[in-house]
Image (cartoon, rainbow, N blue to C red):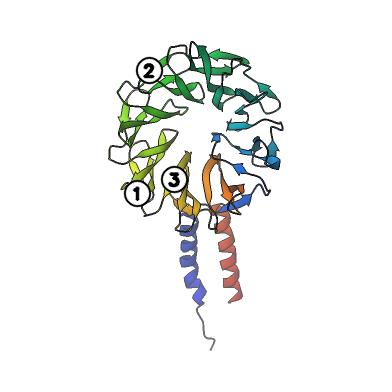
Amino acid sequence: MRRLRTNPYDVQLPVVALLLVLAVTAEASAQWRVTQLTDNDHYDWTGQSSVHGPALVWIGKPDNADNEIFLYDGHTVTQLTDNTFPDAAPSTDGASVAWTAEPSDGTDREIYFWNGNTTTRLTDNADDRNDLWPTVDDSTVVWHGGTAVPGATDWEIFLYEDGSVTQLTANDYNDYYPFVVGENIVWRGQEGGTDYEIFFHDGDSTVQLTDNSYDDKNPEVDRLGNVLWEGEVGDGDKEIFFCDGDLVTQLTDNAQDDGWSNLDGGEAVWERQEGGDDYEIFYFDGSDTTMLTDDLLDDRHPRIVGSLIAWEGDDGNDTEIFVYEIGKGITHLTNNDFDDEYPRIAGNMIGWTGYVDGEDGEIFVATPVPEPSAMILLTIGLVTLLGWRRCRR
């Protein structure tokens, strides 16, 4: 008599398939590929760059002479400048770049703009008047420039759009460090001549957002018109403030120093000198604030773009780069024996400076590794399991 046997794999197949479904549908942090973009004997540095677009920009010192501007668009590194004077403070929106430079005798600084094809000098001032700290978005450039007043320099805000330069402010006090996204522009102004206040321009009119007795600094704005800044409410105590277009909210209220804030899409990050000793990273999701790090080591210089938050953290040996994918988790992007610092997020890329030999800064970039879809993984898994089952019969 023929004895019927049961195949143990028949029983395991539904279970394994269920486990496979759970595995491919569960959210997990992305895998990242790290690439060293530069490898030379001169200094490359991301710390002075402003990035809010799908490209990275930085300053480098070819031949260890003067600073030049470099751009990485995700495929190619391009040297945008090659001259005999220093170029600095580059800003990119991914398609264009603006920076400041010291042409001629080095007594004043001017603004330059690269539109993706050609470079144009936007300012040409006399009387040793400086134009500084440009930011660019949608080919609109803003900066602060000195205007001649008797016995002093009065700093005002300037705007370049549609091929022409406009002086955006004209007052008797200093206006500094404008930041542009879309039609929205913010800056700090020394209204009253004592402390700094925050100003917001929506493309048509200008509104003063703060009016107090302490300094408000480092404003940023997003495309939604949200504004973020830092207020020095006490001696050595900076707090974070947020305006949604109507209401100003103080996001932090403590005895520690909150700073290095960054804004995108109504969400914000900043660092806090927690306990007066080490720095930690905090994240505001538009409603609630979460402490992302909690250790006895410094976590600093956070940036946020979309669902990515990046910062540099001390691992007890040197500084490394970390990324938090919102709703997923924290990934240790680097793990080496040299310092990595000043991360910048460009689309889905994260770039930073790494001091490979301890002195010479090089540029690194991390990109997410494409993951196969859940359907592909499930199909491969089922075909494999069915093949095992067939072989056991």
Horizontal and vertical percent for residue 89? 57, 32
Measured Cα–Cα span from mark 3 to mark 2: 31 Å
Q: Residue at x 46, y 63 (%)?
A: 19
What's the residue type where badge 1 is placed?
Asp
Q: Write down the residue under mark 2.
A: 191
Hey, which quadrant is residue 379 in on the image?
bottom right
In the picture shown, does residue 248 fall above or below 237? above
Q: Residues within 10 Å of mark 1 (few under 14, many from 20)?
A: few
Measured Cα–Cα span from mark 3 to mark 1: 13 Å
In the picture shown, does residue 21 fall above or below 77? below
Q: Residues within 10 Å of mark 2 (few under 14, many from 20)?
A: some
Of circles 3 and 1, the one toward us is 1
- Relative to 265, is 160 on the left or the right? right
Residue 319 versus residue 107: which sits nearer the camera?
A: 107
Horizontal and vertical percent for residue 72? 64, 39
Residue 320 versus residue 310: which sits nearer the camera?
A: 320
Of circles 3 and 2, the one toward us is 2
What's the residue type where badge 3 is placed?
Arg
Instruction: Give the secondary structure at mark 3.
Output: strand
- Relative to 257, is 320 on the left or the right? right
Q: Residue at x 57, y 46 (%)?
A: 353
Asked if labels 2 and 1 touch by Cβ distance under 8 angstroms, the answer is: no
Measured Cα–Cα span from mark 1 to mark 2: 34 Å
Horizontal and vertical percent for residue 299? 42, 48
Q: Write down the residue under mark 1.
A: 277
Label number found at residue 95 = none
Instruction: Give the secondary structure at mark 1.
Output: loop
Q: Write down the residue under mark 3.
A: 300
In the picture shown, does residue 250 fall above or below 38? above
